[in-house]
Image (spheres, rainbow, N blue to C red):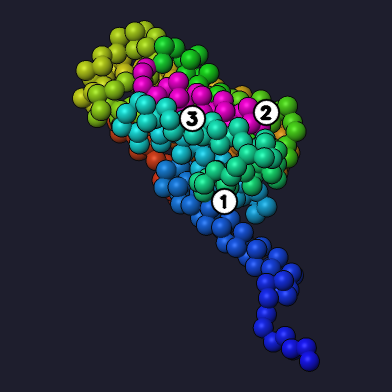
Amino acid sequence: KKKKKTGRSVCSFPMHRLHRLSSTFAASATKKDGQYCTQLVRKFDKENYLAAMLCGSKVRDDVVTLRAFNAEVALIQDAAREPLAARMRYQFWKDAVSGLSKASAPTINHPIARALRDAHGRHSLSVLFLKRLIVAREENINDNAFASMKELEDYGESTQSTLLYLTLKCLHADSLAADHAASHIGKAMAIITALRGIPYLARQKKVRIPMELTAKHSVSHHDIHHATATGPLKDLVFEMACAADAHIKTARSFHSQVAPKHRLALLPAVPCHVYLQQLEKRDFDVFATPAPVPVFSLMKAFFNESY
């Protein structure tokens, strides 16, 4: 007599249940990666986190992933104690980004890298743009002062504007007007980041504002290091604020040519505008102007302004 089979074998396990378990594990891992990205952006880039939350649910996670990638690369500068360690970290992200366009590339074991691969799979994100952002951050690793306003604006184009181009890609925007607006907003963001950074860097005895402006206005590094808002420094800040404001106004001149759903990618212009308003109220004293825009003021501006 043939023995009746009572035990279970691997082969007898229902395949549909195996696929379901596999999908559950994948979804769980993806959720954890998303939570990691969200926590990072909420901690280090709260204004843009709030802007990302206003994007549609279908692209919100991918926009947050891009912001997390930007934050991670930006933090290398402060996190790495030695230049060699920083260079290795930048190379890690260059390799991770290069692998996005290669189907055979191994998956990098990092939550942001995995989330970025998923976003790339959905939107075919530009590897060139992602690498441009890394290279720009790496070239500024020493925190040296920019030589000129143009150099600062070029840095903004390679970092903030590039990030906005990638966000527009997530929203499937194919608009020259939107790209022009993103370019100007990114440059404004770089200028305002430099202004906001003056008090923070002053405590470290560093100055990053363009050297051509410190020379033009005869601004003393001693005054900056000692948080003294002298007349010359206020004149310098005023000139930089005017340049940022001009970029925001130019970006807004394209407003009617940008589809409403694509304007969500350009919301980072709002906190820039709010900061400039607060700076003006304080007579362009960067040491008296709060660098993080108050959440209430920011949310009110988000709902009152398109970008």
Secondary structure under tag 3 reads: helix
Q: Residue furthest bottom?
A: 1
Name the residue rendered at 63%, 27% in the picture: 128
**Among the 4 quarters of the image, the one containing residue 105:** top right
Residue 33 x %, y %: 53, 53
Residue 144 x %, y %: 36, 18
Segment colored magenta: 126-145
Badge nearest the viewer, 3 or 2: 3
Question: Is residue 147 in the magenta section?
Answer: no
Q: Nearer the viewer, residue 256 or 203?
A: 203
Q: Earlier in the sequence, mark 1 or mark 3?
A: 1
Give me the disc on residue 202.
none
**Among the 4 quarters of the image, the one containing residue 281:** top left
Q: What amino acid type should be assigned to the residue bearing mark 2?
A: Asp
The answer to whether residue 257 is above or below residue 171 is above
Badge nearest the viewer, 1 or 3: 3
Residue under label 1: 53
Residue under label 3: 91
Q: Is residue 122 left or right of residue 201?
A: right
Q: Are marks 1 and 3 in contact (CB under 8 Å)?
A: no
Name the residue rendered at 71%, 28% in the picture: 177
Distance (Cα) linking label 3 and label 2: 28 Å
Name the residue rendered at 67%, 35% in the picture: 101
Q: Nearer the viewer, residue 61 or 188?
A: 61
**Among the 4 quarters of the image, the one containing residue 145:** top left
Distance (Cα) linking label 1 and label 3: 31 Å
Q: Nearer the viewer, residue 237 or 199?
A: 199
Residue under label 2: 179
